[in-house]
């Protein structure tokens, strides 16, 4: 197996004592930030990205992988020990997890979440090892018209099919596309939307945009609505599981993994759907005398595994196509670009050392996460009691630090504030964050591919549908759009008297 | 800061005030206007670009499409607002949507942040970072100023050294040049 040999090479590169230290540091930082209420994995990754500057790419990726898994795990700790989940991927974990914690079984809930995350993450990463190179092999032959269509599919699915309001989704998407326009036009070298500012002509740094919208926007929004009565944090001991917990957890872990991975690999918005499906499935399989509603460990094990498997699955389109499908993946793509690495199907061959080191790092980060976080859980739980003024002042401090270190320009801090205010407005007006971030990242890529396709045809628009794959993808887009409109209409009819808007799904916070 | 909230709620519609508050969400008209204006400006900006010879698409087409759709979306949002559409403001661990929005706190935070932007090159990160942290804790309701300033100094000086020693990135030293 060629892939396994390459993975072994990656593991050898990643397993030096120094690199292990970076991985451990990444896991600790990632969990630390992820545990903090209000901070999801994407925000953790965006906030901590500057900490990897100045490292050589291998060390940076290893630290990055640790941050990524740490941030994810931190989020589920929060949702089990606090009643309100921070991001949509943890909503399902919180339902049973918090009930378990209230019954004094916090340690078992945390253990089942941690071990399930580890198993799902490991299986998921191994699946990436098999699928990503195969997909990249096929994708190398994809022409510009099909590429354009696939990217269009990704943004349409994320915008129109997910989320509660299509109008708001599209407003967010086009705000993102507008932000993506800022800077030099790639083929003619003319600045666009630079407001006469030479500092804007280079384009906007995605770290500044992401940190502004995720971190600053969230801190300002919370400041406007700060809960004055503190939430109750359930104390926990060291996570452990009894024989019965193991017996009840292992099947949900595997089923959750099987559900999560494919959903992560297609542009369907990450973990929201598979965690929901996993919860429903476990509930149904639990039979008559189940514990669901009073804290069933299956309801923690399944969704947590689905969550991590889908996070691993997002690496398939990210590495094989250069296509991010979640906010976290978008920021990782930006990180790759920061190292001068051009994402796309060629990535697996031109930067194969780096890719395999990254995949090996994911396995190492995942293992370290388990080793470090089981004993540290009580300490993380204490972190949840951080007085809120310190917590949000800290977020503002580190957001400013992160944006400032990119270029050491006060102008970047001003941009950070502008995007922080945009993030505040988006939360106020319920604009989803994911379409905006994808618009910023994919907009410029789509323009390149569209112009590439039309340059060959001399401007003839029919070139966009000149490849069979492109036609198929456009057909899928139409079906998805029509299906989403029909589903919205049906839901509207059934809730006509109560809700004027098309709120078909329960209100959940985005996967940020 | 419950005394501040009455002044704040006078001018703006409190977010997530619930279905019982009557009338459209006026602030959303503002959002619709901003979206449409951004679209119009994007189109205007694109008209100032020169089109190359060998490039059949040119740098204008994408901004034209985006700008046009933005104007349309702004109009749709205005119509939806007039028909009673209300945003479901975002919930979270530390977010309490049952009380009206506390905008004075937000303004204080923005002011502290602006101070940091203006002074960072003059005073250096080690100083303004501490001001930023202590100022934000104060804005968020902490009243232990000395302790907050001390924590801020530890964070800002610590982060300065972490970037300098650990990552070899010297942040602006400012007035502390030579001391750090």
Image (cartoon, grey):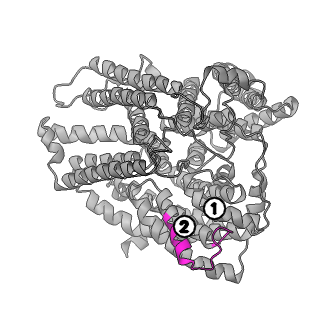
- Whether residue A143 sits left or right of residue A397 in the image: it is left
- Residue ID at (78%, 61%): A378
- Whether residue A235 sits left or right of residue B116 in the image: it is right
- Chain for numbered disc 1: A
- Residue ID at (43%, 31%): B83
- Chain for numbered disc 2: A
Expressed as whole percent of the image width and height from the top left, the position of residue A28 reads 68, 55
> Element at badge 2?
helix
Q: Is any part of residue A123 visible from this angle?
A: no
Quickly name the residue at label 1. Answer: A95
Expressed as whole percent of the image width and height from the top left, the position of residue A467 reads 16, 52
- Residue ID at (67%, 26%): B103
Question: In whole angstroms, how far apart are the C-alphas of marks 1 and 2?
Answer: 9 Å
Residue B165 picture quarter? top right
Expressed as whole percent of the image width and height from the top left, the position of residue B59 reads 26, 28
> Element at badge 1?
helix
Whether A288 is among the magenta residues is yes
**Vertical order, A470 against B140 (above or below):** below
Residue A387 picture quarter? top right
- Whether residue B20 sits left or right of residue A260 in the image: it is right
> How many residues crowd around disc 2 within 10 Å: few (fewer than 14), some, or many (20 or more)?
many
Query: Viewer-proximal residue, A115 or A507?
Result: A507
Whether A61 is among the magenta residues is no
Quickly name the residue at label 2. Answer: A279
- Whether residue A193 sits left or right of residue A451 in the image: it is right
Q: Does mark 2 fall on the same chain as mark 1?
A: yes
Quarter holding the N terminus of chain A is bottom left
Residue numbers of the magenta segment: A277-297
């Amino acid at each position: 197996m060629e892939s396994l040999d390459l993975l072994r090479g990656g593991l050898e590169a990643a397993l030096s004592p120094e690199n292990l230290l970076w991985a451990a540091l990444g896991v600790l930082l990632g969990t630390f930030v992820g545990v903090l209420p209000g901070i999801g994995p994407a925000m953790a990754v965006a906030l901590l990205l500057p900490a990897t500057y100045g490292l050589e790419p291998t060390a940076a990726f290893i630290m990055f992988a640790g941050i990524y898994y740490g941030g994810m795990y931190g989020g589920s700790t929060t949702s089990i020990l606090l009643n309100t989940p921070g991001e949509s991927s943890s909503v399902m974990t919180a339902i049973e997890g918090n009930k378990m914690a209230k019954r004094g079984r916090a340690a078992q809930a945390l253990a089942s979440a941690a071990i399930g995350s580890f198993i799902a993450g490991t299986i998921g990463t191994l699946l990436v090892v098999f699928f990503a190179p195969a997909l990249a092999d096929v994708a190398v032959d994809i022409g510009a018209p099909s590429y354009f269509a696939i990217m269009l599919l990704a943004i349409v699915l994320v915008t129109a099919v997910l989320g509660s309001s299509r109008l708001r989704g599209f407003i967010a998407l086009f705000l993102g596309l507008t932000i993506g326009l800022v800077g030099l036009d790639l083929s003619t070298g003319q600045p666009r939307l630079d407001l006469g500012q030479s500092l804007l002509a280079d384009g906007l740094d995605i770290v500044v945009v992401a940190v502004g919208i995720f971190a600053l926007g969230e801190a300002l929004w919370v400041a406007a609505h700060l809960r004055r009565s503190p939430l109750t944090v359930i104390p926990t001991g060291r996570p452990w599981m009894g024989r019965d917990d193991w017996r009840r957890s292992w099947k949900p872990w595997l089923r959750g993994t099987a559900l999560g991975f494919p959903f992560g690999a297609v542009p369907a918005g990450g973990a929201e759907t598979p965690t929901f499906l996993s919860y429903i499935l476990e509930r149904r399989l639990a039979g008559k005398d189940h514990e669901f509603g009073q804290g069933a460990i299956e309801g923690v094990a399944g969704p947590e595994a689905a969550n991590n498997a889908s996070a691993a699955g997002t690496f398939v389109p990210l590495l094989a196509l250069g296509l991010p499908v979640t906010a976290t993946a978008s920021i990782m793509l930006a990180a790759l670009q920061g190292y001068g690495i051009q994402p796309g199907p060629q990535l697996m061959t031109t930067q194969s050392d780096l890719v395999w080191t990254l995949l090996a790092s994911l396995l190492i980060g995942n293992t370290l996460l388990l080793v470090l976080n089981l004993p540290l859980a009580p300490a993380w739980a204490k972190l949840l009691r951080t007085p809120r003024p310190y917590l949000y002042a800290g977020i503002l401090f580190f957001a400013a630090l992160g944006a400032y270190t990119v270029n050491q320009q006060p102008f970047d801090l001003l941009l950070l504030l502008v995007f922080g205010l945009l993030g505040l407005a988006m939360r106020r007006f319920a604009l989803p964050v994911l379409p905006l971030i994808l618009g910023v990242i994919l907009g410029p890529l789509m323009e390149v591919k569209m112009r590439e396709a039309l340059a060959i045809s001399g401007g003839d628009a029919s070139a966009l549908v000149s490849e069979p794959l492109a036609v198929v993808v456009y057909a899928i887009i139409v079906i998805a759009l029509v299906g989403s409109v029909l589903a919205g209409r049906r839901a509207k009819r059934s809730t006509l008297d109560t809700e004027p808007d098309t709120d078909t799904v329960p209100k959940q916070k985005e996967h940020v | 800061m419950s005394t501040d909230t009455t002044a704040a709620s006078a001018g703006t519609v409190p977010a997530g005030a619930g279905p019982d508050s009557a009338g459209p969400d006026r602030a959303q008209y503002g959002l619709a206007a901003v979206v449409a204006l951004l679209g119009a400006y994007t189109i205007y900006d694109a008209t100032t670009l020169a089109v190359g010879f060998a490039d059949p698409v040119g740098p204008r087409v994408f901004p034209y499409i985006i700008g046009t759709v933005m104007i349309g979306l702004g109009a749709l949002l205005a119509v939806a607002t007039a028909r009673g559409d209300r945003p479901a403001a975002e919930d979270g661990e530390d977010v309490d949507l049952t009380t009206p929005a506390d905008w004075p706190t937000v303004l204080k935070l923005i002011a502290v942040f602006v101070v940091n932007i203006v002074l960072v090159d003059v005073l250096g990160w080690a100083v303004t970072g501490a001001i930023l942290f202590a100022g934000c804790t104060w804005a968020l309701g902490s009243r232990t100023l000395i302790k907050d300033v001390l924590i801020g100094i530890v964070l800002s000086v610590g982060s300065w050294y972490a970037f300098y020693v650990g990552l070899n990135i010297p942040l602006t030293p400012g007035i502390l040049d030579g001391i750090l």
